[in-house]
Amino acid sequence: MNRRFFLKSGSVALASVGLSLSAPGFLQRAVMGAERNAITGGKRKTLIAIFQRGAVDGLNMIVPFGESEYYSLRPSIAIPKPQAGNQEAVISLDGFFGLHPAMAPLKPLWDSKRLAIVHAAGSPDNTRSHFDAQDYMESGTPGVKSTSDGWLNRYLQSKKDDQNSPFRAVSFTQQMPRVLQGRAEALAMSNLSNFAIRAGKSSASVQGGFEAIYSGMKNESLATTGRETFEAVNYLKQVNPAQYKPENGAEYPRGPFGQSLLQIAQLIKAGVGLEIAFTDVGGWDTHVNQGNARGQLANRLQEFSSGLAALYQDLGQRMDDVVVLTMSEFGRTARENGNRGTDHGHANAMLVMGNGVRGGQVYGKWPGLKSDQLNEGRDLALTTDFRDVFGEIAARHLGTSDLKSLFPGYTISGSRFKGFCQNG
């Protein structure tokens, strides 16, 4: 099966799953878009959004070791100041901020100015509910629970897809995430190897049911489309992650997170028109025995950073057209609790990675950790609204000009952009 046939029938396959079984016009447009994609080589700007669910401790992820209050607030869980030869010390970035030692795989990206950090960022809403905070961040409307769609779906709605690719937005999650729910087509799949796909409200597995429906159709045209569809599905099964060989010596961590990143790289390399990729990783709710340079948080950060580094290494020069953005619903308390952990907080740190990123800098105004500088006397205060971070990527990387529809009720202004993202 050659590349052109795969692109053509692959597009038919996913366009017909859970979207429109009786819309040959849509299928034809998908085929035409795939053919254009084959001609252009599939090059397009891509955003990979990664949600750290559970509220990662941003103060131990991107450590403000230059502020003495950090150490007084965290006598048990603080990360030691940078010290030559000490593998458990903070990895200095700029003399004030540093990486948790478990995040050493990301230091080369910082040094090459391919990694930027936005600190003290997040939602202006003060909720400490995981569910509400995640909902607000994914809907892009903090404090408003009635928003029907996610901000990334609104982006898809606002900007025409010249390639008409059914692979335009893919989430490697069990269910469609809130951020991609809405009128625009998006796909959620747990794994390319079993190709279990869900598509919004029309959720259904492609295996079994749809294949039987297609094969039993009296309409020969649709029956032929069905055969091509499942030939493409079978092709995607054949190029499963177990057979995929990452490039440039990249080694993804074992587990669901590493597998998701590997498969995102796989789709980018396939040239099928991927524009928005999403995945998430949990385990950040560290109320008890969080640890410092070692322990619960360190283990999660090791997996997280090694996965990001592997993705970057695997994609190589393709990172010219890719931006990776990480986020978490809120941060954690500045002061450690009685169980040597941290509780639900407020502002946090976001990572931005790519060859088009102005890296090697920590962006955003640092609010400080003194008692009178903390939010509600307990949390890192917010100085950057997450919508300004999202908006900068949407405008300068993805190229949309319709930011108003992405974030209703909030005025996005280029004057509030941090400058970490170069114009595409």
Image (cartoon, helix red, strand yellow):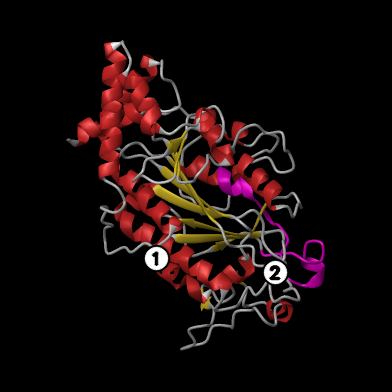
At label 1, the amino acid type is Ser
Task: Say whether residue 55 is left or right of residue 175.
Answer: right
Q: Residue 372, image x and y in percent?
A: 82, 68
- Towards the viewer: 418 or 130: 130
The residue carrying mark 1 is 112
Q: Is residue 135 visible?
A: yes
Magenta region: which residues?
366-391
Task: Say whether residue 305 is left or right of residue 195.
Answer: right
As drawn, the label of residue 362 is none
Specify the quadrant that holds the C terminus: top left
Residue at figure coordinates x 32%, y 57% from the top left: 314
User: In terms of sequence position, does the residue under pointer 1 or pointer 2 come before the other?
Assistant: 1
Work out how far the residue at label 1 is from the one at label 2, CA to CA, in angstroms: 33 Å
Q: Residue 47, image x and y in percent?
A: 45, 45
Above or below, 257 relative to 132: below
Q: Is residue 36 visible?
A: no
Specify the quadrant that holds the N terminus: top left
Q: Residue 93, image x and y in percent?
A: 51, 73
Residue 369 highlighted magenta (yes or no):
yes
Indicate the secondary structure of the residue bearing disc 1.
Answer: loop
Task: Say whether residue 318 is left or right of residue 143.
Answer: left
- Towards the viewer: 209 or 227: 209
The residue carrying mark 2 is 342
Q: Residue 275, image x and y in percent?
A: 42, 39
- As drawn, the residue found furthest toward the bottom would be 85
At label 2, the amino acid type is Thr
